[in-house]
Image (tube, helix red, strand yellow):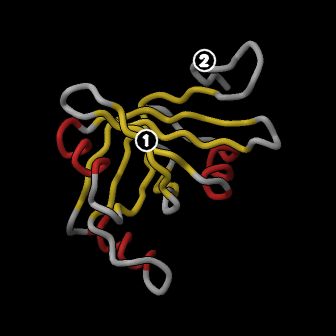
């Protein structure tokens, strides 16, 4: 597993994240996840609010990549790993509480185990695995 550093956590907290998944036929899907946040040093969590293609793809194969960037700072990261959706239990309860008063009740809580991290900064390290 790969670990998030503070700069990554700050970027996830302050920027819009996009999640990319793939269906059983290899067709990609990408969408914004305004609820993406850090669960702990090795996991991200988001509220699945639409129950659409992202949810179907995760339920089918569990593959996911999350990208987040700050265009003005020319900084960004891509987090790849496995995802699982929870419709009850502690992850779901946490997602429902997070949504209270600002978002609809989630259809699920998506938890992504981060296995690899790439830098999206321009220059010689662009698209390369992150190294501290």
Along the viewing direction, whichever of 30 and 83 lies nearer the viewer:
30
Secondary structure at badge 1 equals strand
CA neighbours of label 2 inside 10 A, class few (<14), some (14 to 19), many (20+): some
Residue 2 lies, with reference to residue 11, above or below; the image says above
Question: Residue lying farthest bottom?
Answer: 101
Left or right placement of residue 100 versus residue 83 in this view: right
Q: Is residue 28 above or below residue 94?
A: above
Q: Residue at x 34, y 61 (%)?
A: 48
In terms of depth relative to the viewer, which is nearer, 34 or 132? Answer: 34
Residue 26 appears left or right of 94: left
At which x and y percent is residue 121? 72, 28
Q: Quadrant of the C terminus?
A: top right
Q: Which mark is residue 30?
A: 1
First reached walking from the N terminus: tag 1 or tag 2: 1
Mark 1 or 2, which is nearer the eye?
Answer: 1
**Residue found at x 24% / y 34%:** 23
Quarter occupied by residue 29: top left
18 relative position to 94: left or right: right
The picture places residue 51, in percent across and down from the top left corner, at 27, 60
1 or 87: nearer the viewer: 87
SS at mark 2? loop
**Figure check: 43 above or below 61:** below
Identify the mark at residue 128; answer none if there is no mark: 2
- Decide: is 125 above or below 37: above
- The CA span between labels 1 and 2 is 21 Å
């Amino acid at each position: 597993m790969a670990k998030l550093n503070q700069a990554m956590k700050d970027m996830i907290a302050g920027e819009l994240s996009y999640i990319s998944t793939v269906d059983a036929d290899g067709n990609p899907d990408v969408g914004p996840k305004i609820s993406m946040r850090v669960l702990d040093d090795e996991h991200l969590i988001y509220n699945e609010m639409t129950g659409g293609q992202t949810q179907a793809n995760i339920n089918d194969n569990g593959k996911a990549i999350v990208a987040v960037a700050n265009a003005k700072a020319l900084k960004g990261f891509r987090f790849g790993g496995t995802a699982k959706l929870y419709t009850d239990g502690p992850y779901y309860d946490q997602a429902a509480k997070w949504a209270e008063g600002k978002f609809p009740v989630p259809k699920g809580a998506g938890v992504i185990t981060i296995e690899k991290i790439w830098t999206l900064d321009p220059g010689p390290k662009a698209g390369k695995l992150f190294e501290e």
